[in-house]
Amino acid sequence: MSNTERNVLFGMENSLNLAQKISERVKLPLTPIKKEVFADGEILLSSTETVRNSNVFIVASTHTPVNDNIMELLIFIDSLKRASAKEITVILSYYGYARQDRKAKGRQPIAAKLVANLLETAGATKIIAVDLHNPSIQGFFNIPLDDLRGQYVLARRLREKHKDFTVVSPDHGGAVRARILSELISDSVKIAIIDKRRVGTNQIEVLGMIGTIDSEHAVLVDDIIDTGGTILNAAKIVKEHGAKTVTIVATHGIFSKGFEAFEQSEYVDKVIISDSIDRTQLLEKYTKLEVVSLCDFISQVIIATINRSSVSDIYKGFRNDL
């Protein structure tokens, strides 16, 4: 890194494993965060070292418990702002409330916009996000934002499998995501789409499959796996349409109901996620789960930010490596 300005790297408590990998890759030591918890539950966070006139990077995730993690991040950003940090870049590997990006009904909030406002008010000067649920969330910010595409690291792992895949979107809304992943794996990879419609609360009617999947290795792709009900149902449909194997890939593995349903499913052969949310404990317990790291991708973006170089060139490099 050629820039001589002082750069400081932090990792929030829920992202320490990813932050440590990034620290080793960018050759910036991970500065400890001092945390105090008061009797009434209030918290106080601050840097253990001076950050005056420094460019600060915070590796964070706002997954479960979402509200606690968001509040801790906001308090820490505020502490850095008041300690005279020059720039505060938040590497947000998972953006909580991203699915509340519009008013689906009257009197509903747009919480994704509220979180954007809070991050800016706290003092963030730039956001590096990973696979925002809706790319339009970028417009909620009045500060620079890089939305990194998790498909790049997922495609690299899939290519290592040396199989002929067909990429399947679980619904029409994910067709673009499926197309991007298919093109990253190979120009010859086909896509298919599960055609369904919602007929009631938690009730889905499957109308059919757009495209063929008979006797092929299927890759079901989504950005977020939460309870897993939708993607597990999609895996069943794909297997019933003749898929030889079913691999589920997603950037963010929340697994709010646990991973047991995936491990025990006869329709799922493998689940591949990124480490945007730390799932080290699940890896030790389940055989169907694989995790690929965002470390290299995020590290290159941090270096580009420090050196004021192009992030687009990083994407080109990833394409050339695939």
Image (cartoon, rainbow, N blue to C red):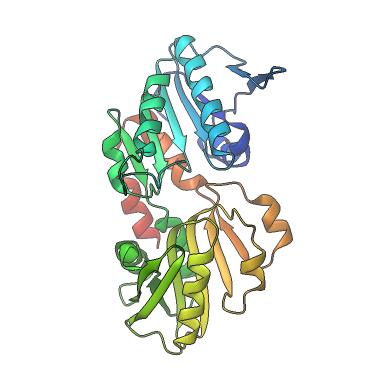
Residue drawn at (56%, 26%), measured in percent from left and top?
Answer: 72
Is residue 105 in sight in this rendering?
Answer: yes
- Is residue 228 left or right of 261 when viewed as pictured? left
- Residue 135 is situated, as x and y percent measured from the top left of the image, at 30, 47
Residue drawn at (54%, 42%), measured in percent from left and top?
Answer: 63
Q: Is residue 299 above or below residue 8?
A: below
Q: Is residue 192 above or below residue 254?
A: below
Instruction: Please state, as top left, top right, bottom left or bottom right, where the N terminus lies in the image.
Output: top left
- Residue 4 is situated, as x and y percent measured from the top left of the image, at 41, 20
Residue drawn at (27%, 45%), measured in percent from left and top?
Answer: 136
Q: Nearer the viewer, residue 177 or 87?
A: 177
- Residue 24 is situated, as x and y percent measured from the top left of the image, at 58, 37
Residue 165, picture quadrant:
bottom left
Residue 152, picture quadrant:
bottom left
Q: Is residue 90 above or below residue 214?
A: above
Q: Nearer the viewer, residue 167 or 321?
A: 167
Residue drawn at (63%, 32%), measured in percent from left and top?
Answer: 13
Residue 188, picture quadrant:
bottom left
- How many discs mark residues in the rendered view? 0
Q: Nearer the viewer, residue 92 or 133?
A: 133
- Is residue 86 left or right of 24 when viewed as pictured? left
- Residue 69 is situated, as x and y percent measured from the top left of the image, at 56, 33
Instruction: Please state, as top left, top right, bottom left or bottom right, where the C terminus lies in the image.
Output: bottom left
Is residue 157 in sight in this rendering?
Answer: no
